[in-house]
Image: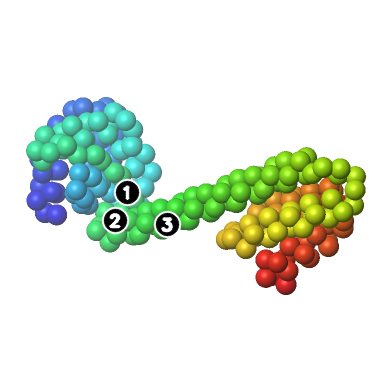
Amino acid sequence: MEQLADVWKQALPKMMEGVSGVGVWTALKLAVPVALDENVLVVGVPSSEVELGGHLRVPMTIRSVETVMSQALQKPVKMRVIDGTTTEDYELVKRRDAERRRMQEAQMAKERAELASKNSWDGIYEQLSRRYASVPNRTLPQNRARFFEEAVEIVAGVRREQTTYDDLAERNFARCIERISQYTEISSAYVALEILKRANEI
């Protein structure tokens, strides 16, 4: 940490040569090199001067700092600006980063599950349409009864394998129930009852 601070101090005049503006110069003078995390140079500004962080995030300033410090450290680095000037401040930032990533991953997993569920039910919805279209003499009640039995079993099988029960999944499930009801002229509530029984939910 002390070695990094020394490198920063020695490189500061050259970094300031590459930028212009009182605000940027002030920000660079007050900035503190907090850590070198692999190839990320973490630079902090005092909590009382957080608005100065905006000057450090300007592309011209970033290029100047990264170019000069890469030369000084003899390896390419990317700058990251944080609020605070201590290692504890950086640890807090990393914990927030981890939590943000966790939430993003959870959201992505949820969206993938919702999409998979939707695609699954959409496929079943279309399958029901094709099956009904292939039923001979659909006006005969006995043939609609055979279709009902087959359709209920198909939907119940998918329902047993279902892992997502959010609002979207339930609505797509309901669409399939309504389709069977429409084709067979049987109450949708009764269709749902039969499916849920076979899916071991009732």
- Quarter residue 142 falls in: bottom right
**Left or right of 3, for residue 97:** right
Q: N-terminal of the two: label 1 or label 3?
A: 1
What label sits on residue 82 in the rendered view?
1
Query: Distance of mark 1 from mark 3, alpha carbons?
Result: 20 Å
Residue beneath disc 2? 90
**Left or right of 128, for residue 83:** left
Count of marks, rendered view: 3
**Circle 2 crowding by C-alpha within 10 Å: few under 14, some 14–19, many from 20:** many
**Circle 1 crowding by C-alpha within 10 Å: few under 14, some 14–19, many from 20:** many
Quarter of the picture containing the N terminus is bottom left
Q: N-terminal of the two: label 2 or label 1?
A: 1
Please provide percent x and percent y for residue 114. Answer: 58, 51
Q: Are marks 2 and 1 in contact (CB under 8 Å)?
A: yes
**Circle 3 crowding by C-alpha within 10 Å: few under 14, some 14–19, many from 20:** few
Residue placed farthest to the bottom in the image? Answer: 202
Q: Give the residue type at disc 2.
A: Tyr
Please provide percent x and percent y for residue 122. Answer: 66, 45
Residue beneath disc 3? 102
Name the secondary structure under disc 3: helix
**Left or right of 53, for residue 147:** right
200 or 102: which is nearer to us?
Answer: 200
- Quarter residue 152 falls in: bottom right
Please provide percent x and percent y for residue 131. Answer: 73, 44
Name the residue: 70% across, 59% down.
Answer: 153
Query: Distance of mark 2 from mark 3, alpha carbons?
Result: 18 Å
Q: Give the residue type at disc 1.
A: Ile
